[in-house]
Image: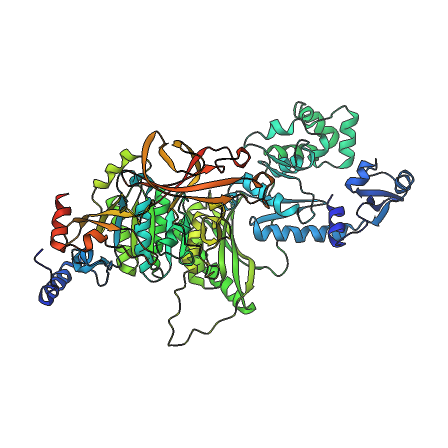
Amino acid sequence: MWPIDRLQRQADSTPSAEAPLILAGRVGNRRVVTAACEAAIGLGLRVGMPVSKAQALVPDLRIEAADARADLEALERLGLWLLQRIAPIVAVDPPDGVVIDVTGADHLHGGEEALLEMLLGRLTPSGITARLAIADTWGAAHALARYHRESTVCMALPGSTATVLAPLPLAALRLPHSTGAGLRDLGFATIGDLMDTPRAPLTLRFGPELRRRLDQALGEVAEPIDPLRPAGLIEVRRSFAEPIAAAETIARYIGKLVTDLCTALEARGEGARRLDLLCWRVDNRIETVRVRLAVAQRDPKRLTRLLCDKIPSIDPGFGIEIMTLTATLAEPLVARQASSLLEQAPPDISDLVDMLANRVGHRSVYRLSPVTSDVPERSVARIAALSPDQGLGWPGHWPRPSRLLPRPEPIDTMALLPDHPPNWISWRGIRHRVRRADGPERIFGEWWKRDAEARAVRDYFRIEDEAGQRFWIFRAGDGEDATTGSHRWFIHGVFG
Amino acid sequence: MTELVPRPTVAALRARIAHLEGAETYAREVLPFGVDMLDRRMPQGGLAVGCLHEIAGGGAGAVDGAAAASFAAGIAARLPGPVLWCVTQADLFAPGLEQAGLSPDRVIYVEAGDDTAVLACMEEGLRHGGLGAVVADVARLSMTASRRLHLAAKASGTTGIALRRWRRQADASDFGQPTAAMTRWRVSVLPSAPLPVPGVGRPRWLIELIRARAGESFDLELEGCDGTGHLGLPADVADRPAAAAGRQHALG
């Protein structure tokens, strides 16, 4: 789908999007269909079919010339985008794939599942028909992403590679075309058939490639990913005559790499926003460390400190032989003049924010900003910790609790309808007799958000029990009309 | 209650003793609460800036920590500079904190996975020096951890507030364990003053100073933080002589 997506993304606002589109390329002397859009596939056109036949089947067919080079270049651009945002090791998997090593990078995005969801959410609106898979090996992920039937997103549990690969067709193994055809002639249909067969006769007949691909998919043979390094990326590198493993040694070389990198950044007038430290181990595995910065930086001391903070996450194994440091995302950084003597500059806390964000994840360091919404849980939005001051606040004419429960909890009450506060409430098995109460404060559902909220109403009360505990409770519904809510009571917050 | 008037000689002697002791108990700067009855009974007349303090809720407040959070927000609001608030579960309601005086532009929240990570983030914030206050919701606080935090706070002059909050009511007995904090407070909710009309009045708290270095403990009934983070004196106490009020609360 990639060539089609690329064309349709380039031709913005396609008026003739309804007309089925195919791409035509040459194989030998024949003009064949190399890609077809959803509509064309629905009409019975197939990849590999002669173009003349396709034209005969569908009269008003749009035909564009296939451009494999432009496809690859666009794929590299997508790979670069992923490199800057997702993980330090990204490579293109031509003709239509990108492979990402998410080991050690998934937690920055809230886990593997959240990562896939986020990727799908970013790719789909920009017109890319993406199929995603996470598996133990490149081969398995390649196969699952392309041939897994049930959904566009697929996660294979660790260690389940053989099980999930078994039902997939042979084409999923990245075999040369002739080998695939030969195996089909012999009656092999799925990868599972191949796994059950003795290897020696197969190797004798089809050569070592078949065995290599199968072992790669099953993880018995290592398949290193050669990371995409586009031209113009600032990268510094150190190779060691003897492999290094001690934390102090790693820290010392990180310091040297950072100094080199900062010199290179300064020469270009840039500061780093993302730093990737790649450590090639002697057993041909790459340990990665990614550091995000909230604002562009090229202060060697700060960058060294951020990277050294991550040393415990590097597993040196039998030793590290090469270390490279890359400024994956760099932004122009111009020196600013310090403010005048009279005014006191606000303290710079960007280094603290970077430090904390790299330790607990950049989503977990935030500020809260007001949103104009009466619904309490929607009235607060998370913004970046270093965003400029909003100068806004919440309307202060009603008291608000200092702790809001993650979600409202149902309570038992006895209350007069329609607009009296309860006489008592029972929350978490403890009964509180209500002595004083304020309310109701009526909040209407936001019909522009969801249809179900068109008539929804909440009546909030602030109550105080005889011990002085103050709670924020509400009734779903206005107390008269059953369509406005269930008329059950909930507790939503605790006042100080 | 002999020391109603601050005496310069005594203060100078205290400073000298503190200097001999290695500036351990003597704070360079204090933050007065702005309530005379409270400040007069604190050593040096206010909350020591650049130290670690502990606050817990009393009763059910040990679990929900609502009153303690408002009390801490009031203190942080009156200290200049940004505030770092480290939590394990994000249940703080920013509009409520704003009503205790803490503007949303000043607070950076850090959501860390567990108590250890929260303490590490708190120490990082205290060491930095650019912040006004660091607040952290923690359950367990060992002597070693609190000592580290206190030293970090002393070195940078940032005030640290450990908001002790436990998952279960039974765990709150942990509050009896010694820590290196400068002061230890317990804030419990009390019924608000009756209004002439139906409704809930300004929150009222029983504020107990359970432990203070170089000071005496006491308890006091006060009204919750206003929009600037200041506590209020209840009207029925304000009209009475201070000594009488003190005696009454000491008995009750």
Which corner quadrant of the image does residue B33 belong to?
A: bottom left
Q: Residue B220: give x, y in percent of width and height.
A: 19, 49
Residue at horizontal 41%, vertical 60%?
A349
Quadrant of image for the N terminus of chain B = bottom left
Q: Is residue A396 above or below residue A411?
A: below
Q: Residue A408: give x, y in percent of width and height.
A: 44, 37
Q: Nearer the viewer, residue A34 or A349?
A: A349
Q: Is residue B201 above or below residue A131?
A: below
- The chosen color scheme is rainbow
Q: Nearer the viewer, residue B242 or A184?
A: B242
Q: Nearer the viewer, residue B140 or B89?
A: B89
A35 left or right of A408 in image = right
Which corner quadrant of the image does residue A60 belong to?
A: top right
Q: Residue A207: give x, y in percent of width and height.
A: 72, 33
Q: Nearer the viewer, residue A411 or A23?
A: A411
The count of marks equals: 0
Quadrant of image for the C terminus of chain B = top left
B213 left or right of A323 in image = left
Q: Looking at this rendering, what residue extends furthest in the bottom direction?
A: A341
Q: Is residue B24 visible?
A: no
Q: Residue A473: give x, y in percent of width and height.
A: 41, 39
Q: Looking at this rendering, what residue extends furthest in the front direction?
A: B196
Q: Is residue B148 above or below residue A346?
A: above
Q: Is residue B178 visible?
A: yes
Q: Is residue A31 above or below residue A218?
A: below
Residue at horizontal 19%, vertical 52%?
B237
Which corner quadrant of the image does residue A472 belong to?
A: top left
